[in-house]
Image (cartoon, helix red, strand yellow):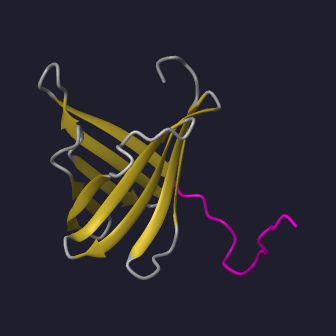
Amino acid sequence: SATGERTEQEEHWGEAIGETRLGWFRMLRGGQARFYEFQAMRADSAGVRLLIKHFGRELDGWERPDSSTAYTLESVGEHEARFTNPHDDYPVMNYHVRDDTLTIRLEGTDRASGMPTSLDFRLARVRGPAPGTTKPEHPE
């Protein structure tokens, strides 16, 4: 980052159950949470949509309480998916997987200059133990 503080990002997705797959994201800078996202990807009559709710570090919602940021799946390839939301500051969101790296690129237009702009989030896959090989902890 410009401040020299380390920025860390983390995104997790669960298995699809029924029509929905749930995920979450967090960004930290200098060990302090900057923001969080709760995500739901689901298929319905509108197609496949990615619904996102953003939260500040105190879990204050960015969107109105009765809304979310919704992207629609426009295309999918072997290692990529493209979602769009014409009403967002970054109307295009591209997911690209290469080996164990997921790159999420948000594309938009800078309001002041009118020039194209983008934000990239690069996430490395962290492989956990094989399913069923560990017992989840439960505080009793």
Q: Quadrant of the C terminus?
A: bottom right
Residue 126 lies in the magenta-colored region:
yes
Could you tell whether 87 is left or right of 131 in the image? Answer: left
Q: Is residue 52 above or below residue 31?
A: below
Q: Residue at x 66, y 66 (%)?
A: 128
Residue furthest toward the front?
Answer: 66
- Image position, residue 114 (x, y; %): 11, 25
What stretch of residues is rendered in magenta? 124-140
Q: Residue at x 14, y 27 (%)?
A: 115
- Image position, residue 41 (x, y; %): 37, 66
Q: Residue at x 77, y 74 (%)?
A: 134
Q: Quadrant of residue 133?
A: bottom right
Q: Is residue 81 above or below residue 18?
A: above
Residue furthest toward the top?
Answer: 3
Residue furthest toward the right?
Answer: 140
Q: Is residue 32 above or below residue 91?
A: above
| Magenta-drawn stretch, dominant element (helix, strand or loop) | loop
Q: Quadrant of residue 54?
A: top left
- Image position, residue 47 (x, y; %): 21, 72
Viewer-side residue, 44 vs 76: 44
